[in-house]
Structures are given as C-alpha cells and as structure tokens.
Amino acid sequence: MKKHEVDPVIARNRKAAHDYQLGESWEAGIVLQGAEVKALRAGRASLVGGFAVVEDREIWLHGVHIPQYSQARWFNDGSRRKRKLLLHRAQIDKIERKVNESGLTIVPVTLYFKDGRAKVEIALARGKKTWDKRYALAEREASREAERAVSRRLKGRPD
C-alpha cells in the first residue's frame, strides 16, 4: 500500500507573508535537473526573492536558490536558474488572468516533497505598504502580550 505522507518542509518563504498579502494558492510540481533533487533532500534551498512569471502559457519560477550538490560531478546547473512549474492548463489560465487584471504577483510560499516528488506552493500576492507591515507587527505584538497576560493570571502571578 502506498504511503501518502507529506515530508517535512524543505524551505518556507516567511518573508513573503511579511511583504505581501497572500491570496489564493496552488500546489505545483517543479521540473528539476541533475542533482537538484539530492540538494533538496539535503534540505538546502531558499525561496527568498523568488517569484513566478507566466510566459507563453507556462509558469516559470525565477530567483529560487537551490545550491549545487557537493557530491555530484557533472550535472550541477545554475543555482538560480529559472525552473518550470507543472500545473493544469485551466489553473495556468486562471492565474494568468488574475495577474493581468489585478496586477498581482506570483510568489512561492513553501517547497516540500509529497509522495517523493518535489512540490512548491505558489500564491497570488499583493504588495504591502510600509504602514501595513507596521500595523501587522503591532497587531501580532499585542496578541502576544495578551496571551502572556492570560498565562500569568492562570499561573497565579499578579503581574
């Protein structure tokens, strides 16, 4: 019987949630070459600065850093080369329509293995303004402080 497990996340783009308002997301396969899979299995990748573009009705991932696998001999390709994403045609058309109409950006959010295949979660994103970022940080800090106060009261400390 085949196992349907999601392996631990290889890379997560935490900066995307800070810099963008994330919207609808999709799971896409990613075309890798040579020893890139082994480099990913070693847990070495970075999604920071990555983005996707629709070109000729195909989605390409740019700026994702998958370092060279040190034990590979010949097949080490460029670490920041563009990589093709695998999605259904209807999904690609929907993404392209939303990007063109609304001026959204396609951002990679997480990179992981699922059933032995490399997958990347992409999301449509709208850039945040500086004041949005400050507001989000202040809101997060206020909720943390409230949680601390509740836990102190539950423990019997009058702080």
Image (tube, helix red, strand yellow):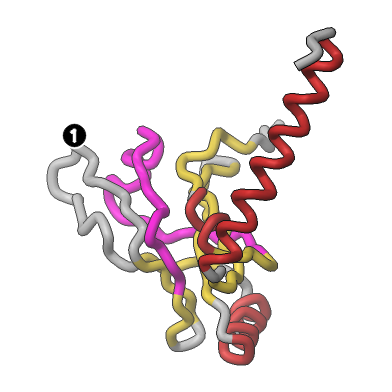
Nearest the viewer among 50 and 91 is 50
Nearest the viewer among 31 and 51 is 51
Q: Is residue 27 covered in magenta?
A: yes
Q: Is residue 136 visible?
A: yes
Look at mark 1 in the image and give the residue it sits on: 71
Residue 142, given in percent of the width and then of the height, sits at 70, 41
Q: Is residue 63 left or right of residue 3?
A: left
Q: Residue at x 57, y 90 (%)?
A: 100
Q: Residue at x 62, y 87 (%)?
A: 102
Please identify the quadrant where the C terminus is shown. Answer: top right
Q: Amino acid at mark 1?
A: Gln
Examine the image and state in which quarter residue 23 appears: bottom right
Q: Is residue 118 covered in magenta?
A: no
Q: Is residue 2 visible?
A: no
Q: Residue at x 73, y 25 (%)?
A: 148
Packing grade of label 1 (10 A; few <14, some 14-19, many >=20) is few
In the image as oriented, which residue stretches furthest toward the top?
156
- Position of residue 98 relative to residue 23, above or below, is below
Residue interval drawn in magenta: 25-52
